[in-house]
Amino acid sequence: MKTLGLLGGMSWESTALYYRAINERVAERLGGHHSAELLLASVDFEPIVEMQQAGDWDGAARLLGAHARRLADAGAELLVLCTNTMHRVAAEIEAAAGIPLLHIADPTGEALVVGGHRRVGLLGTRFTMEQAFYRDRLVDAFGLEVLTPEADDRDHVHRVISDELVHGVVRDDSRAAYRGVVDRLVASGAESIILGCTEITMLISAGDSSVPVFDTTALHARAAVDRALAG
């Protein structure tokens, strides 16, 4: 089993989901009393948020790259960045660490293709929905057509993530609002929905959508274990 290096804290709420999902997958694969061999660097999220808001992606890359390098130096063999948004600087983090990074969009794209889904709706932070780094990877590597919500819906989806979910707050009215966003994406032609923020799985699930839902947190964690156990 390769040692996983988890780069988390963005937010710690979703990083906790990763820890459980990874260990559950190891137990499923190996049985007995097996659990994951992993190292965790949980960063202070506040400076990252400030850099996001300022558009200082280079600064964020340097900060997270330094943490990733420490994980590699401690023995991590595969890097798992426990956030969708900060894959904006995934290449820089991987270069700084000097070990492979499992990109979160890849297991999701693979699952969508296997399921025969080509036109997908993407929910996430404003950065994930509006910038090209995530959408283009799904388009270029997997041939997907990616739809995002209208501007008002994007603002609301982002606000719920940043003001509620990263603090562990799950509200029924926010779930209802997200269901409305999903319905509008489906009406626009989305055949499935990507939960493209690691906290969204705390709020909505398959029962909140009339089309299949793809949880990036669960898919990423599962793929990380399968990669760690390969060979």
Image (spheres, helix red, strand yellow):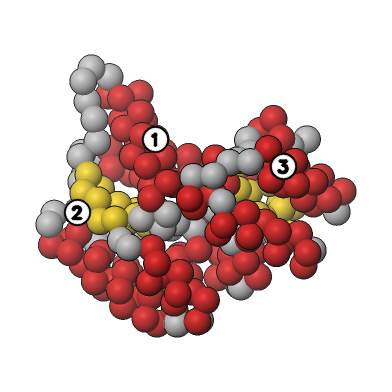
Label 2: state its secondary structure.
loop
Q: Is residue 111 at least partly visible in the picture?
A: no
How much space separates mark 1 and mark 2, taking CA atoms? Answer: 18 Å
**Residue under the point 27% across and 38% down:** 229
* Quadrant occupied by the C terminus: top left
How much space separates mark 3 and mark 2, taking CA atoms? Answer: 41 Å
What residue is disc 3 on?
Answer: 173
Label 1: state its secondary structure.
helix
What residue is disc 2 on?
Answer: 76
**Residue under the point 68% across and 38% down:** 172
- Res 28 quadrant in image: top left
Q: Is residue 179 left or right of residue 128?
A: right
Q: Earlier in the sequence, mark 1 or mark 2?
A: 1
Q: Residue furthest top?
A: 32
* Quadrant occupied by the N terminus: top left
* Amino acid on which the number 1 mark rests in the picture: Ala
What residue is disc 1 on?
Answer: 21
**Residue under the point 31% across and 32% down:** 23
Residue 198 location (% of width, % of height): 50, 50
How much space separates mark 3 and mark 1, taking CA atoms? Answer: 27 Å
Q: Is residue 215 left or right of residue 6?
A: right
* Nearer to us in this view, 47 or 121: 47
* Amino acid on which the number 2 mark rests in the picture: Ala
- Asked if 41 appears above or below 136 in the picture, the reply is above
